[in-house]
Amino acid sequence: MSLYHEILEQPHVLANLVRDRARFIEIAASLRSRDWRYIMIAARGTSDHAGLYAKYLFGQANGLPVALAAPSLFTLYRTPPRLTDALVIGISQSGVSDDIVSVIRSGREQGAMTLAITNDASSPLAAASQHVIEMQCGDEKSVAATKTYTAELMCIAMLSCALSGESSRFDVLASVPEKAAAILDLDQRVARMVERYRYMSSCVVLGRGFNYASAFEWSLKLKELAYVTAEPYSSADFAHGPIAVVEGGFPVLAVLPQGEVAQEMLAMVRVLVKERQAELVAISNVAGALESASSPIPLPDDLPEWVSPIVGIIPAQLFVYYLARAKGYDPEHPRGLAKITRTQ
């Protein structure tokens, strides 16, 4: 049962990264020694969702524009864009995917600063990069990424804090492992909850702002482990047409923490429940959202929005793990998938 155990390991992994503050400060100082104006991130799958989180965090906390790379421009089309003014970051658990490595190599050839975030410091991605942040997760044997995903988020958050130079933000991150451990106490509550969704075949997953990434990650896990057709949306984009799919009993899953997007998202889910009779699963610390949900999953009350994706995805992982088992599937061996996927 490696997947379940790896979910449980996440507070320990996060705590290791938090204790490594000095390393992030050292890397940030080296990065600031060069003049770059924006960040280009290359990633695939779960790591791409970490890139979405980085887009919001570096933009909000560091004032930096963030672009997500189109790796095929570097490999199949052989027309890489100019990266001379960029910090090019490759995010990959394994560090072996050729297309992600190609983006880093191209950036370095163009004279850009390059950084790898990976769980394998001996990987091709790490070798191609000037700077390496190792996730320190140990082996992740399950096909579905769990602890490496939250480690990627924590690495991004630690780097953002180091680049900003605001020590108080490091103090916020220091509380995250404890909050992650506390939310694992919801384990059996989530296990009982998923029985209600045993026959769910499709759903939408909503998030916005920092948790736009969470919507994509929860959706991916539902697809790869429980074989549910799950579509992720920003709540704002969902209002522009896709909302039409919702009718009585249609499952809507939402990650809705306190923060700047809370009131907009709360208004949305209330409409979905009251006017369209949606079936709402809410991961939230907003009272109105928990009250509106058929299946409420509470987040800690004192959880700042910018770190909520690190903690809030953990009950989503448990939800999918138990849902796959309730459906009679083996979450340790999802059909047609391998641990490492190599793309060009």
Image (spheres, rainbow, N blue to C red):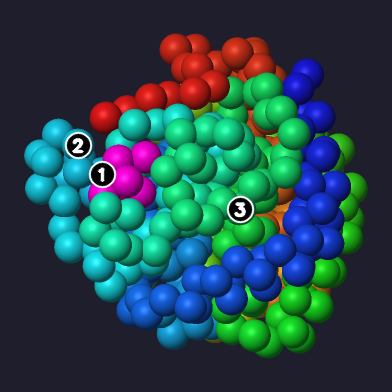
Q: Please tell me which residue lies in front, 35 or 81.
A: 35
Query: Position of 6 compared to 124: left or right?
Result: right
Q: Please tell me which residue lies in front, 30 or 338.
A: 30
| Marker disc for residue 71 | 1
- The dominant secondary structure in magenta is helix
The region drawn magenta spans 101-106
* Residue assigned mark 2: 75
| Local secondary structure at mark 2 | loop
Q: Give the class, few, some or many, for how many residues have Cα within 10 Å of label 1's Cα (few <14, many ≥20).
A: many
Q: Label 3 sits on what residue type?
A: Ile
Q: Residue at x 55, y 17 (%)?
A: 334
Magenta region includes residue 104: yes
| Residue 233 appears in the picture as rendered | no
Q: Residue at x 32, y 68 (%)?
A: 86
In x, y percent, where is residue 205? 48, 50
| Local secondary structure at mark 1 | helix
Q: Label 2 sits on what residue type?
A: Thr
* Residue assigned mark 3: 133
Q: Label 1 sits on what residue type?
A: Pro
The answer to which quarter of the image holds residue 311 is bottom right
| Marker disc for residue 218 | none
When the figure is inspected, residue 305 is found, relative to residue 88, above or below; the finding is below
In x, y percent, where is residue 240? 25, 65
Alpha-carbon distance for marks 3 and 2? Answer: 25 Å
Quarter of the figure with the C terminus? top left
Q: Residue at x 50, y 62 (%)?
A: 53
Alpha-carbon distance for marks 2 and 1? Answer: 7 Å
In x, y percent, where is residue 144? 59, 29
When the figure is inspected, residue 161 is found, relative to residue 138, above or below; the finding is below
